[in-house]
Image: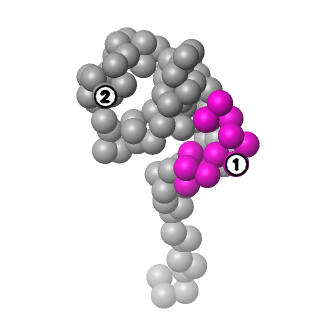
Amino acid sequence: VDFLVAQPDIPPLLEQVRQWVQTDASKTLRRMAIEGRPDVNCQVLILRRLPPETPWKVLAEEFGIPASTLSSFYQRQCLPRLREFGKSEGYL
């Protein structure tokens, strides 16, 4: 056992995702916004839905947009971009 090579540390996935979203180098996440509401974009929603998750009800009250609209936008626009990032980093 003394001669076994130690496994490398597991990369902190959540921090890598958070860094990717905050940086948004291509500005793709900022450009993907609910129509007429550039302040409600994928960057904002992904950051708010990362642990600790902000409930849809709270976000709906904060932005004045129905929770169903926010959730639908997140499913259609934000999650596919999260998946793309996960694939590009070898997580998926």
Q: Which residues are magenta?
A: 19-31
Q: Does residue 74 appear to the left or right of 92 in the view shown?
A: left
Identify the main secondary structure in magenta: helix
Location of residue 2 in the rendering, given as x and y in whole percent from the top left corner = 48, 87
Asked whether 45 falls inside the magenta stretch, the response is no
Q: CA distance from mark 1 to mark 2?
A: 27 Å
Element under label 2?
A: helix
Location of residue 36 in the rendering, given as x and y in whole percent from the top left corner = 55, 17
Mark 2 residue type:
Glu
Q: Residue 25, relative to residue 53: is it above or below?
A: below
* Residue occupying image coordinates x 32% and y 38%: 53
* Residue occupying image coordinates x 61% and y 35%: 30
| Circle 1 residue | 25
Q: Earlier in the sequence, mark 1 or mark 2?
A: 1
Q: Residue 81, relative to residue 70: is it above or below?
A: below
* Residue occupying image coordinates x 31% and y 35%: 54
Instruction: Rate crowding at label 1 as few (under 14), some (14 to 19) or many (20 or more) other CA atoms within 10 Å.
Output: few
As drawn, the residue found furthest toward the bottom would be 2
Q: Residue 78, relative to residue 49: is it above or below?
A: above
Please state which of residues 73 and 81 is positioned toward the viewer in this rendering.
Answer: 73
* Residue occupying image coordinates x 64% and y 41%: 85
Question: Any mark on residue 62, and which?
Answer: 2
Q: Does residue 86 appear to the left or right of 53 in the view shown?
A: right
